Amino acid sequence: MGNLIIPGETELSGRIYKDWLVHHEIDGRVPQPVSDPPVGLRNVKNMCFLNAILQCLYHTPMLRRNLALACESALVKDRWLIQLQQLFAEMDASRVRKELITATEMAALIRAASTNGEFKEGEQADAHEAFMLLVSRLLEGCISSRGLSLTEKEQIEQSSLIGHIFGMSLSQSVKCKSCGDQSVRSRSEYCFCVTCPVERDRSSLDVKDLLTNYTQEEHINEWKCDKCSKAGCVRHAGIRDPPNVLLVHISRLQRGLGPTVTFEKELTVQCESQKGQKTRKKVKYNLFGVIVYRSMGSNGGHYFAFVKTGRGPKEQWYLADDDDTRSVCWPEVLREEPFMLLYEAVTVIPPLVTDPEQRVFEEEKIQKEVRKKAEAEAAAREKARLKVKKEEAFALYHQRHQADIERLRQSVMSWNPGQKADAKQLEDPSPPGTELSSTTAGSEGRCYRHEDNAWSPPREVVRRRSWQEDFSKWSLFHSCQCSVPSAEYSDGLEDDAMHCA
């Protein structure tokens, strides 16, 4: 994670949340489903709408896993998030105790957050409205919205813990039929709302058809182009960024009228193509929750839910009707008219990368390239400096070597002034007790020894020989900038090359 700050980011949103997912190795891992059967919730003062929502949220695998882990990591500070996790914990504990519980704290939060009195105590309410209110408050607990524009707030919400689960981007394009001018807009949504048409000639309509109707092109002749001032356009809508949990709300213009909506366990959603992409992305979903509204005429209606535990061969559906919970077969679920459907993606979709994040990534990339270039230039300068130092050291060594030879010449000649020294012998003055080169001793095997009283080398000869053998070490010491004296250098040059690193 970079050091640049993005407004609105918290531990549960933006780059920090993405790093947290990677740290816990859950960024691309499909969460395990709930394996235990549901527990009952008491219906106190017409709370069936809230009980149905909470049962579906409890059986949302990604929400259960990420929220519990965030609370364990002490990242959650918001009251709504904490209360929801506490309710999940109480439901787990009540299963062991085999006792019913009441979501009184969550109901109190819903009533207190009501702005138009739609969630008054003891009165019936709409489950879809309650879900949207609950999600909006959970989102607020994941971000810091102070000073953010509407677009920035929407993007940072989608990159949060809750937005990563339920958030999606819906796009809408309008193209002029005459000049071809096109405008594209997108907005964040947390529920895909479709309307069931009133078609008396059809007895049933699949939810896939409702989604297809939403994405079909619509020709509007009354529209007027701002560019060419001519009338007529083609409007197209679709999903740009799909969610990990797709919530579909099926509304009716009038309850009881129109075809029956059918649904299946699997759903494939075709998303809009992104910039630079030629093909449209397809996302596969599996159904895990169904909220049903059963009308009771003038007495209102009643909400209950069907939830799924396990996956594949271990899949089992349950009825969660307030305090009544029991296992059911799939055909029994299909017989009911769906009010809301909850699907989970087969593969995990990564969190949204916001525009500020993208700009930060680009700035950090530029800074990284600048640092890399500066390091390369510094390394090149250091290499050149060491090369110059080595050349200077070699020149100085050569100068001293020639001075040693000259001193040796003078010493030999002054030691035996009656005998002229051979010039070739002076070029390779070997110490006493060793064989001379072929130019001096050669095949004759002549050598000077102390016992022969022929010649005793001066100290300069031994010193020059030591310098000649250790030139590389001497050169390294000369070019080094540290304070280690040359006398402390070891015999291994590879150790000396690292002593001042």
Image (cartoon, rainbow, N blue to C red):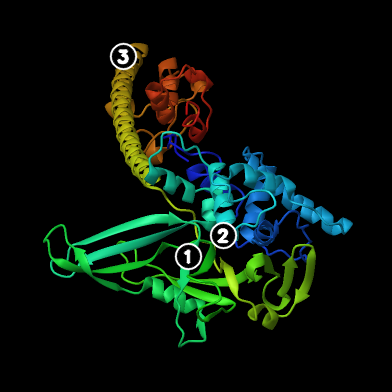
Please, what secondary structure does the residue beneath circle 1 have? strand
- In the drawing, what numbered circle is on residue 128? 2
Residue depicted at 87% across the width and 59% down the height? 98
Q: Which of the two labelled residues, at mark 2 and mark 3, occupies the earlier sequence position?
A: 2
Q: Which of the two labelled residues, at mark 2 and mark 1, occupies the earlier sequence position?
A: 2
203 left or right, relative to 39: left
Instruction: Tell which of 132 and 95 is nearer to you.
Output: 132
Residue depicted at 54% across the width and 44% down the height? 115
Instruction: Tell which of 424 and 99 is nearer to you.
Output: 99
**Quarter-of-image position of residue 413:** top left
Dot 2 amino acid type: His
Against 400, is 130 above or below?
A: below
Image coords of residue 382 (percent x, y): 33, 30
According to the image, label 3 marks what residue?
410
- In the drawing, what numbered circle is on residue 193? 1
Instruction: Tell which of 128 and 75 is nearer to you.
Output: 128
Which marked residue is nearer to the observer: mark 3 or mark 1? 1
Disc 3 and disc 1: Cα gap in Å? 106 Å
Disc 2 and disc 1: Cα gap in Å? 10 Å
Dot 3 amino acid type: Gln
